[in-house]
Image (cartoon, grey):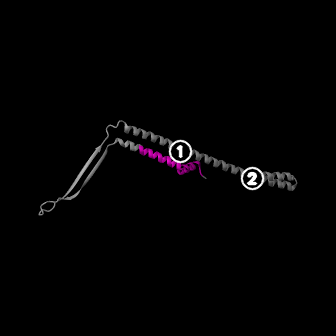
């Protein structure tokens, strides 16, 4: 037997709708983080180098080996963008908020479906048990009617009524 908490947990864990809405919310969070990154400077560093040999015009001289390294470092920072970064970040924040609300709505819909299915199942089980109890009562009534008929206390109509009730 499953409790309603278990049914809701299974529904949320196996629903493709919740998986999809969670992925969309995570993507919106990543977009917001990317939009916030525009406020930071970008730094590029390059290093190029290695051993090199110089070739001299004098054949008596041994070529000299040298190691050369050229490094570059660049820093870029946007000072004025006329509100582009702030607008992009605000839009990404609102999209993140909307994705979160959408995910909550999907979760609530899945929980509502699971609860409805659980209560329908419980009602069906109750109806089945009631039908079995009714059948047991009808069998007992039929047996009693047949015994009363056998001893002469009931008519054949009483037995037929009990059979009809059982059917």
**Total number of numbered labels?**
2
Q: With 55 as the anchor, is 128 left or right in this view?
A: right
> Percent x, y for residue 122?
64, 48
**Crowd around label 1: few <14 · some 14–19 · many ≥20 (10 Å):** many
* Label 2 residue SS: helix
Q: Which residue is identified by label 2?
A: 135
* Label 1 residue SS: helix
> Percent x, y for residue 76?
30, 43
Q: With 26 as the anchor, is 8 left or right in this view?
A: right
| Residue 24 belongs to the span the image colors magenta | yes
> Percent x, y for residue 63?
16, 61
Q: Which mark is residue 153?
A: none
Instruction: Please tell me which residue lies in front, 159 or 106.
Output: 106
Instruction: Please tell me which residue lies in front, 99 or 55.
Output: 55
Q: Residue at x 43, y 39 (%)?
A: 91
Q: Label 1 vs label 2: CA separation? A: 43 Å
Foreground mark, 1 or 2? 1
Q: With 45 as the anchor, is 56 left or right in this view?
A: left
**Crowd around label 2: few <14 · some 14–19 · many ≥20 (10 Å):** some
Q: Residue at x 76, y 51 (%)?
A: 137
The boundaries of the magenta stretch are 2-31
Q: With 29 as the anchor, is 42 left or right in this view?
A: left
Q: Which mark is residue 106?
A: 1
Q: Give the overall secondary structure of the magenta segment.
A: helix
> Percent x, y for residue 105?
53, 42
Q: Residue furthest bottom?
A: 60
Instruction: Please tell me which residue lies in front, 7 or 148.
Output: 7
Mark with earlier residue (1, 2): 1
């Amino acid at each position: 037997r499953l409790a309603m908490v278990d049914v809701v947990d299974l529904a949320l864990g196996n629903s493709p709708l919740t998986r999809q809405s969670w992925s969309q919310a995570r993507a919106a969070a990543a977009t917001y983080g990317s939009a916030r990154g525009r406020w930071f400077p970008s730094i590029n560093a390059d290093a190029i180098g290695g051993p090199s040999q110089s070739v001299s015009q004098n054949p008596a001289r041994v070529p000299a080996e040298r190691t050369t390294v050229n490094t570059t470092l660049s820093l870029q920072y946007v000072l004025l963008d006329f509100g582009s970064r702030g607008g992009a970040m605000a839009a990404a924040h609102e999209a993140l908020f909307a994705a979160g609300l959408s995910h909550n709505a999907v979760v609530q819909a899945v929980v509502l479906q699971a609860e409805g299915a659980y209560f329908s199942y419980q009602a069906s089980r109750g109806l089945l048990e009631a039908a079995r109890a009714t059948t047991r009562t009808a069998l007992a009534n039929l047996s009693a009617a047949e015994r009363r008929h056998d001893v002469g206390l009931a008519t054949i109509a009483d037995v037929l009524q009990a059979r009809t009730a059982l059917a």
